[in-house]
Amino acid sequence: MQGQHFAKQTQRERACSLVHGTWRCAGVRVASVGACALMVGQLLLPSVALATECADSAAATGEVAAAPAATVDANAATTPTTEAAPATQNEADTQQVSLADTVEGAGDAMPAEQNASSNNAAMPAGNAIMPCGVTDVTGGGGVTIDTNVESYYRECELPPEISLTGGGSFSWDFGPVPDEVADKLSNASETKYYKADAATGALVEVADQSQSNVTISIAPYEGQMRATLTLTGGDFVDGNYALIRNEDVPFTSTLTFDGTDYNDGILIGDPDSTSDKPAQIVVHETRTDYYLRYNFNTVVKLAAHGQAINSVDLGSGYIGYRAGDTPAPTTHVPYADYDKYEIAYECWEEMDNSDPTDLHPVAFWYSDEGMYTPGMKRIDKFEEGKHYMHSVMLRQKNGYEFANGCTVAINGEPLNAMSVQKVEDGLFLAPTTSFTCEKALVWQAIDTVEINGATVTFKDGDKPVFTGATSDDTRYWYQCEFWNSEDGAGVNSAWFWDQNIENHIDTFEAGKTYSYGFYLKSHEGFYFTRDTRVTINGKTYGYWWNESDAENLDRDGKTTTMWVYTNLTMTPEATPAPTPDPRPTPDPEPKPDAKPGQAPTTATTTTTVSTTKTPAVKPTAKTTDATLAATGDSTGLVAAAMSLAGAITAAIGIASKRREN
């Protein structure tokens, strides 16, 4: 019984344990399933809410969801279009604009790969740029536009003085602007009207053209702005009037995309993002604003009636042509006469010199293309053996008029009066020069230059001396030589350059180092190169070129002038001290001092000497004072010794007498 009871009890306990274990396992599974369901619900809740919000928005507007808002940097200006005038930058306000609107303003400045997305259902108007693959940014992320603003100024100034007479005009070019904005200069075209105010002595701007005396038109001309001043008439007093204008006038802006920064954040649809921060996009761009900066501070001379031009002094850069050379303009008007007349054209004519008594042109070259006529033979290059003649046409302007008998000079040389012809609008000068063309030069490089006989050694205190000369005057000739010191002082053999040296070397100083240089010019057909060797007094030295010659060498590989600084240096020696006499005069021997109460030795010596017979001595031709003094001292000592000896002898004699007695 006990055994059966024990067996049943054990069996019941085992059955209960199995049931209880089964319930425990089932409970754990139910709890796990519940936890998973709760987690899934929490994860799906934002998506369901977002989907509901998008569906409601789409149903209400009939459009796809808008892009996230873009935050514009408070320190950046609103992005302009590429042709918009510069806008004043508001640094205080923070503007909220949509991404589509922001990038639409940037235009073509953004990179092409961001211009569209094939996954977008629709594109905004204006082909605006949308972020590819981004439909939302968690946490309120956005786009920041960072605009760096730069300014470019084209300085526009007029000459200090301008003359306007009797309906005349004056034009002035301000200089080119960058090529990329030259076509935008028309945005700054303007016409202003000024009245000559005698009370203030100034040109005062007026709005009514009928009240003006002077008109200023500013318009594009060949990639730059040209100002044209015209004396339109009206009532005014002849005199000088100040024209003042200080103003910056904008004419265009450009926008350049510099790059985009993607700060770390979570983007919906980006499985690789590991950050829990919202994404921030920063678009960097540079806006360049272009201005015309007018700085007018000019005196305008107004005269109702024209003035006579009595003399003309033209400048010319003509240096002679040879076979194969191409004609080019060489004549120019001096600056002081810009407002009075101008060069209408220059002309070269090839003359038929088969008959010296009947020269007539057969070919032409004009600086003004408008002077050619159909069928006219042109001069492209000068030819050897042919004769050519040069002429210039001057055109008067601004009410000025060439006077009868007006004299003409070119580079200061008077032109023959027979070559000056007064015409309706100016002067015709023919010929100004003529020549028979020679064969082309075969240019030769100068391999070595020699300076001989140059003084290159000096002592302290010596004045500069220049003795150098060239040994070959067929290829080059000597211009000057010079010394420069290490402290910037200099001296030149040619007065023309020496007079302008502020820190001048008057004498050479010991201990300072001086370097030698020279200046040469080549004859026609010869030139110097960087390989030209320099010898001075038969010794070769290194050297370096001055700036202008170095520029010619860098550009052309040759130069016709040679201003060089050599490595020949000199340091003057100090002047040696005078050598002392090898046999100096001996100092006199000191005389013995006399004892108090005792007669001077000299007196005793004199007495003794006077009683002593001495041999005669032949006198020398000339005895110095020092020799006489020395001789006197020796004689005194001898006399004293003799006196002492005499006294001793007398004493001995007296003693002997007393013994005898």
Image: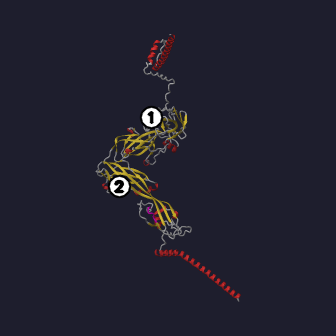
Q: Position of residue 100 (x, y in %)?
A: 47, 67
Task: Judge whether residue 525 can be spotted in this image.
Answer: no
Q: Position of residue 374 (x, y in %)?
A: 45, 48
Q: Is residue 303 above or below residue 96?
A: above
Between 584 and 565, the one lying in front of the other is 584
Between 34 and 271, the one lying in front of the other is 34
Find out whether the residues at labels 1 and 2 contact each other: C-beta distance under 8 Å. Answer: no
Between 379 and 101, the one lying in front of the other is 101
Marker disc for residue 192: 2
Segment colored magenta: 71-76
Between 270 and 404, the one lying in front of the other is 270
Q: Position of residue 620 (x, y in %)?
A: 48, 15
- Amino acid type, label 2: Lys
> Outermost residue, top direction?
661
Q: Quadrant of residue 329?
A: top left
What residue did someone put label 1 on? 506
Marker disc for residue 362: none
Residue 46 falls left or right of residue 224: right
In magenta stretch: residue 569: no
Total numbered circles:
2
Q: What SS does tag 1 mark? A: loop
User: For the residue carrying disc 1, how many other residues have a C-alpha within 10 Å: few (<14), some (14-19), or many (20+)?
Assistant: few
Instruction: Provide the major secondary structure of the magenta segment.
Output: loop
Quarter containing the N terminus: bottom right
User: For the residue carrying disc 2, how many other residues have a C-alpha within 10 Å: few (<14), some (14-19), or many (20+)?
Assistant: some
N-term-proximal mark, 1 vs 2? 2
Q: Is residue 244 above or below residue 353?
A: below
- Amino acid type, label 1: Asp
Task: Judge whether residue 541 can be spotted in this image.
Answer: yes
Q: Is residue 569 above or below residue 144?
A: above
Q: What SS does tag 2 mark? A: strand
